Image: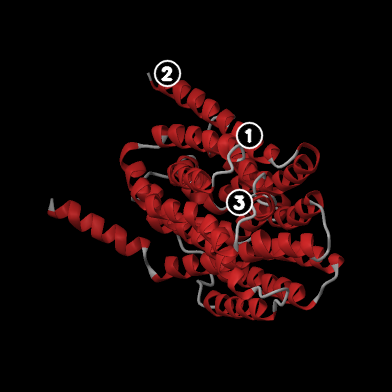
Amino acid sequence: MAKGDKKIKLDRKTIFSGFVLKLLFIMFVVEFVKGALMITFLPVYMNDVLGATALVIGWTLAVQYLSDNLLRTPIGWIIDHIGYRASMLTGVLLSFGAVAIIATTSSYFWIIVACALLGIGTAPLWPCVITGTTEIAGEQSSGTIMSVVYIAWLSGVGLGPFVITFFMDKGHYNSAFTLLIGMMVAVLIVAFFLPGKKKDIQAKDSQHKHVPAERIRPLRGSRITRIKNYLSSVRKSLTISPLMFPAMFAQTFALGLLAPVLTLYATKILALSGSQYRFFLIAGGFITVLFMVPVGKLVDRWGTKWFLNIGFLLASLALMQFTYTRSIMFVYALVVLLGFSYALIIPSWNALIAAAIPPERRGAVWGFFLTIEGMGTTIGPVVSGKIWDDLGPHAPFVTSGCVLFLLFLTHLYISQKKKVGAR
């Protein structure tokens, strides 16, 4: 028992090391700023001031997601070779520039440019944080560390749109931008203290599994040849069902469908007051944060199967029912149910993916997987805006619910096939 207690204590100390805390701080603040801009400020500003349709708003958000997504795979490769500090500093500086542009212009063209710049700037965020934290935590704590990472992400994404409403006073946004720029300065300072070179993971991962010498031997030849050999070795080392690749896309596509219309639905269709809207934003997120770490610990102990099955099914049912009620209390109840569903999905889903990634290629593979997932958040807002304009406010929510139900069926099939294969 003493030996086990010592191991748990060591794991906790390692997971919450200074390096991981820096990454989590950067994750929280950048997502706070990004959430404030993407979820609350830009949809409201573009609709009320510029008169943009939901489709135009969706395309503007998609520009940010697209520029973020296109760079995730190459940045994962860069992290594997040059480390965290240079990658993250470059991204933070570009994000800072994007916020500054949005703060100083009312031109629709420059807002699109700023969104593209923000996407490029935030591209290193997820590959750096996921690679660094999973490197430190190791495979046996993947569910727990994913819960912690997503709490930082969700807290930022949730609090950003919530807090920024207190600083948007009757069309005057100066105090809001002062807050956002001040937070970006803090991130810039913290990023300077990240490691200059990537930590050596081979010794760390040797505690968990043996890595054959031929898989970690330095690659030789021209740069193009080295990259091809590197990607080839990554492909050969993956142990994942082919159905997981469209499932990765679908999982974020379901969320992307909600991004440009959630605020519009709450403010235009439900006509929520300022305080009601803030509660609407925070209700589901609070439940997700509350349950995510306990679920992550249970995932490390019991596996991912049942958590994903239940989570996908509950989220699907909540979304398909969401727009067919006008009772505010029932809407809040569905938001809470959706938050609980994602508390089951997030740590389970990412622990499932992390288990398929070879430790010596974490940066590149996470970058590749995040690119696939990022396509969902890129295409989702465009489709959402189109079907909102053409089919009405119900369409994005029902479509998202249907996608999650298909994910439930897909994962059910994959898990059953895996069980048969094991037998």
Residue 83 appears in the figure:
no
Please state if 305 lies on the left or on the right of 372 as rendered.
Answer: left
- Badge 1 is on which residue? 246
Coordinates of residue 238 in the picture (x, y in percent): 53, 37
Coordinates of residue 113 in the picture (x, y in percent): 81, 65
Q: Secondary structure at mark 3?
A: helix
* Residue 420 numbered tag: 2
- Badge 3 is on which residue? 367
Q: Residue at x 66, y 35 (%)?
A: 399
Colour logic: secondary structure
Residue type at mark 3?
Gly
The foreground one among 201 and 404 is: 404
In this rendering, the label closer to the viewer, 2 or 1? 1
Q: Secondary structure at mark 2?
A: helix
Residue type at mark 1?
Pro
- Mark 2 and mark 3: span between their CA atoms? 31 Å
Please state if 47 lies on the left or on the right of 9 as rendered.
Answer: right
Query: Is there CB contact under 8 Å for labels 2 and 3?
Result: no
- Mark 1 and mark 3: span between their CA atoms? 16 Å
Query: Is there CB contact under 8 Å for labels 2 and 1?
Result: no
* Residue 330 numbered tag: none
Where the C terminus falls, by quadrant? Answer: top left
